[in-house]
Structure formats: C-alpha cells, structure tokens
C-alpha cells in the first residue's frame, strides 16, 4: 500500500484487506513499515503509553528494525525469519511489528543504495528488506504479504516498493490526491529504473542478501474517505472522483505501461474493476473507525455488542457494516484475480 500523500487510510485498508483475505482462507502476513506504527497499534493492545516500549524490551528481535540489525550493523549472524504476532480473532493472519526507530535506518539505507558498489560493508543492506520478508513469508507459508508504508519518497519506501510484486495506491477524492497521482506517475518508473540498474551491480547481486531484479506490477487504486448521499458519493466528492479517474487513465497508467509495470489488460477486465483501475471505493467509516480500532477488528466484523447500539440505532448501523463487508469482499476477490495465474 503506497502513496506519498498521507491521510489516505493506507493502514486501515491494509488491516481490513488482510483480515478479509485471511477470512477467505489465505495465510496473510502484514508488515508495518511505517515508523508511526499505526498498523502495529491496530493489531496489538497498546492502551498504555509504554506498552510498545515494553513489547520491544520483552521481545528482542520481534520487530522490523531489530530483525534487520544483522545487515544494518554488519553483525556476524545472518538474518532470520521474524516471529510474527498472531492477530487476535483471525486465524492465518500475522503481523511483522514496526518500530518507531525504523526512520533512523533511512539514512543508512539511502547511503547504501548509492555507494554499496564502492563500499563493500554496505552491500548487504539494500537486499535485506526483501530477504527478511521472504524468510518470514516462507516460515508462515504466506499466500500474501501486505506492506503498510509511510507517506513520503524516502529510501525505505523506494526499496520496498521496487522489491514488491505489486503496488496498490490508496487515494482520497481531493485535489491533493490528484496531484499525488501525477507525482507517482513520475516517481514509480524512476524507482523501478533505479532498481533494475541496482540488480545488475556485481556488489549487490553477489551480496549475502542479493538485491532482486524488480518484478513490480500495478494492481490499482483504492479511493476512500468520502461521504455518501443516497448511496453515491456526495456531489462535493464526485468531481474529484472524475479527476482521479482521469489522472489514473491519462497520466499514471501510460507512465507505468511505458516502464512495463502494468498487468495485461485482460487481467483488469477479468477482475471487473471500477472505473477501469479502481480496486475499490470505500466511503467514510465515520464513528465506526473508532470502535474498530478499540476492538482491534475490521469495521465489517463489528457486532451490536461492539458498537453498543440497540433497537433502531443498531438497525440503522447494521446496513453500513454489511455494506463495508461486501466492499472488502469484492476488493479481496479482485486482488485474488489480479495476483492469480
């Protein structure tokens, strides 16, 4: 899940999609690669201010930053698969917890990605993220690994996007998301071209953790955080829906196609996308998001007991919950078709 614009519900989408894919029988690992650790907070009970620090202290190596330390600090021990956190209430769903200090590795990775050919001590760093993900995915026999990335165009996002198999772009119907689509049409091809050159470097291809030849493809866009009126986006958002679709079709897709980052057209057709390249359109969760975060479960799995509503209030709330379930079920089905054979 990547967009250099913040506030587009990347974390919420990752959590809800991961849960739905697991509910549909897949084994899913979610990786919290955002130093803000919002996905970690959605999964784990961190109601006390020092709960995350306590988890780090009691579980050394059980977060992304610690797990990558052998590569970043040139430790004389190999990377190993992470011991993931099992997501309570959903079998087959696991979390690779994030770390607030992961941002400290941004500079080291950036230097390594520029100088690893000439400084041998840095050669294992660029391939370490992908290697850790592969080890962990193999350990849990994962069908999907979902990466929740921070907003921004730093070296960690550059590394994780270009070494992923697929990218989903969450966006909101506003002028800033339209501008972000234009930016991503330039940035993602630049990143992939860099990764292709990096994969050919002798220092990186012969490293203990080789930097992989990129195989990135664009799955689609998820538009969210808008209000409904009579079951459709309110008029204030309708214009930006059209502008987003136009930016995707006229700017993003041609740029990605030129860099060979698109799937075959028939894949998108078979997945019955919305508006050509929309995987899902998800309206605002309103007050349900707070309950979802408190209960650490998806919006579409909330019960009457969870929301503490009865009678007419519950009757008015239930259709919204059911509609979100249908939306995420369709989204998961499209992801299955797009990523399948």
Image (spheres, rainbow, N blue to C red):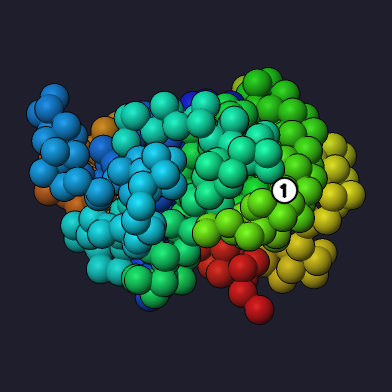
Q: Residues within 10 Å of mark 1 (few under 14, many from 20)?
A: many
Seen at 25% across and 50% down, the residue is 62
The residue depicted at 35 percent of the width and 71 percent of the height is 139
The residue shown at (41%, 26%) is 104
Q: Nearer the viewer, residue 41 or 157?
A: 157
Q: Is residue 145 left or right of residue 41?
A: right
- Where is residue 106? Give x, y as percent: 50, 30
Q: How many marks?
A: 1
- Residue topped by disc 1: 198
Q: Is residue 218 left or right of residue 302?
A: right
Q: Nearer the viewer, residue 238 or 50?
A: 50
Position of 196 relative to 186 (above/below): below
Q: Quadrant of residue 11?
A: top left
> Residue 322 location in percent, x, y?
37, 55
Q: Quadrant of residue 136?
A: bottom left
**Residue name at image x 47 percent, y 64 percent:** 134
Please determine whether, in this image, residue 258 is positioned above or below residue 209.
above
From the top left corner, tell me how far across and down residue 88 is, in percent. 19, 57
Q: Quadrant of residue 52?
A: top left
Q: Is residue 245 visible?
A: no
Image quarter hosting the N terminus: top right
Q: Is residue 268 visible?
A: yes
Spot occupied by residue 175 in the image (x, y as percentages of width and height): 68, 20
Furthest residue to the bottom? 341
223 displayed left or right of 104: right
As rendered, which of 41 and 68 lies closer to the eye?
68
Give the left or right position of residue 264, taking residue 332 as reference.
right
Quadrant where the image shows the C terminus: bottom right
Give the vertical position of 101 relative to 136 (above or below).
above
Mark 1: secondary structure: helix
């Amino acid at each position: 899940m990547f967009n250099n614009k913040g506030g587009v519900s990347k974390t919420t989408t990752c959590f809800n999609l991961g849960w739905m894919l697991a509910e549909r029988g897949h084994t899913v690992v979610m990786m919290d690669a955002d130093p803000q650790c919002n996905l970690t907070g959605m999964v784990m009970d961190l109601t006390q201010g020092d709960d995350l620090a306590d988890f780090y202290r009691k579980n050394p190596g059980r977060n992304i930053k610690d797990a990558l330390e052998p590569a970043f600090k040139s430790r004389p021990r190999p990377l190993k698969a992470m011991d993931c956190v099992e997501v309570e209430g959903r079998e087959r769903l696991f979390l690779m917890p994030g770390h607030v200090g992961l941002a400290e590795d941004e500079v080291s990775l950036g230097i390594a990605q520029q100088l690893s050919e000439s400084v041998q001590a840095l050669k294992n760093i660029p391939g370490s993220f992908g290697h850790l993900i592969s080890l962990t995915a193999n350990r849990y026999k994962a069908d999907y690994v979902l990466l929740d990335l921070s907003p921004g165009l730093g070296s960690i996002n550059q590394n994780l996007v270009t070494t992923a198999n697929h990218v989903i772009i969450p966006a909101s119907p506003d002028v800033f998301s339209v501008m972000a689509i234009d930016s991503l049409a330039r940035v993602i091809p630049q990143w992939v071209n860099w990764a292709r050159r990096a994969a050919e470097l002798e220092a990186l291809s012969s490293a203990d953790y080789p930097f992989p030849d990129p195989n990135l493809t664009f799955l689609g866009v998820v538009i969210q955080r808008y209000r409904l009126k009579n079951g459709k986006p309110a008029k204030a958002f309708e214009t930006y829906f059209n502008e987003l679709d136009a930016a995707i079709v006229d700017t993003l897709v041609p740029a990605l196609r030129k860099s060979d980052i698109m799937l075959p057209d028939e894949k998108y057709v078979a997945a019955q996308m919305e508006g050509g390249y929309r995987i899902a359109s998800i309206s605002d969760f309103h007050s349900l998001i707070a309950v979802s975060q408190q209960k650490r479960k998806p919006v579409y799995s909330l019960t009457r007991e969870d929301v503490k509503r009865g009678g007419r209030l519950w009757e008015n709330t239930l259709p919204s919950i059911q509609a979100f379930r249908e939306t995420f079920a369709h989204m998961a089905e499209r992801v299955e078709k797009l990523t399948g054979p």
